[in-house]
Image (tube, rainbow, N blue to C red):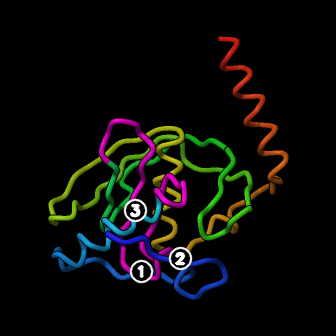
Amino acid sequence: MAIRPIVKHPSDVLEKSCAPVTTFDKNLAVLLDDMYETMIEADGVGIAAPQVGTAVRAAIVDFREGQDPIEMINPELVLYEGSDTDIEGCLSFPGVFGEVERYDHIKIKAQERDGSWYELEAEGYEARAILHEMDHLDGVLFTSKITKYVTQEELDEMIRLQEEEEEEV
């Protein structure tokens, strides 16, 4: 496994629709393993193949302690409902944060690294992370969906207040 450079905006690979994965082999496994290591090194919760310079429909989301990361190959959104607005950031946009509205409950169909299909339902933050990464596969950047930008200082204050509230409970 290797840590790959994260592609930063502006870059053409971030703004193009990715090709479907058709070959499920060792090269795909290496790509997924490298993406995971790169995401962990960058302290991210998700990463898509174009963010490491490869324009294929593969992405990973991982923030559930004690559970395997969610590998999504050729993901499709099959159900979506509700909406929620929250703050997002992106490894390809260091230091940029903003409020983005997304579906709050989703169901996706995607392939595993061996090509087998699975379905997954997600809500809240997990749904948000999955949708963010799926957008990358279509060349859609989160900055095109931001309704209000948030500074690092504002974000730090929000996190501090949230932590205080959690301590009181």
Q: Amino acid at mark 2?
A: Gly
C-alpha gap between disc 3 and disc 2 = 23 Å
Q: Amino acid at mark 3?
A: Glu
Which region of the structure is painted magenta? 40-68
Of callouts 3 and 1, which one flags the residue occurring earlier in the amino acid sequence? Answer: 1
Of callouts 2 and 1, which one flags the residue occurring earlier in the amino acid sequence? Answer: 1
Q: Which residue corresponds to the image point at 22% horizontal and 52% vertical from the top-left?
A: 118
**Percent x, y for residue 51?**
50, 74
Which label sits on residue 37?
3
Q: Which residue is mark 2?
A: 139
Q: Which residue corresponds to the image point at 41% horizontal and 41% vertical from the top-left?
A: 122
Q: Amino acid at mark 1?
A: Cys
- Judge by depth and name the residue closer to the eye, 68 or 147: 68
In this picture, residue 97 sits left or right of residue 131: right
Do callouts 2 and 1 mark residues in contact (Cβ within 8 Å)?
yes
Of callouts 3 and 2, which one flags the residue occurring earlier in the amino acid sequence? Answer: 3
Q: Which residue is mark 1?
A: 18
- The outermost residue toward the bottom is 12
Image quarter for residue 96?
Answer: bottom right
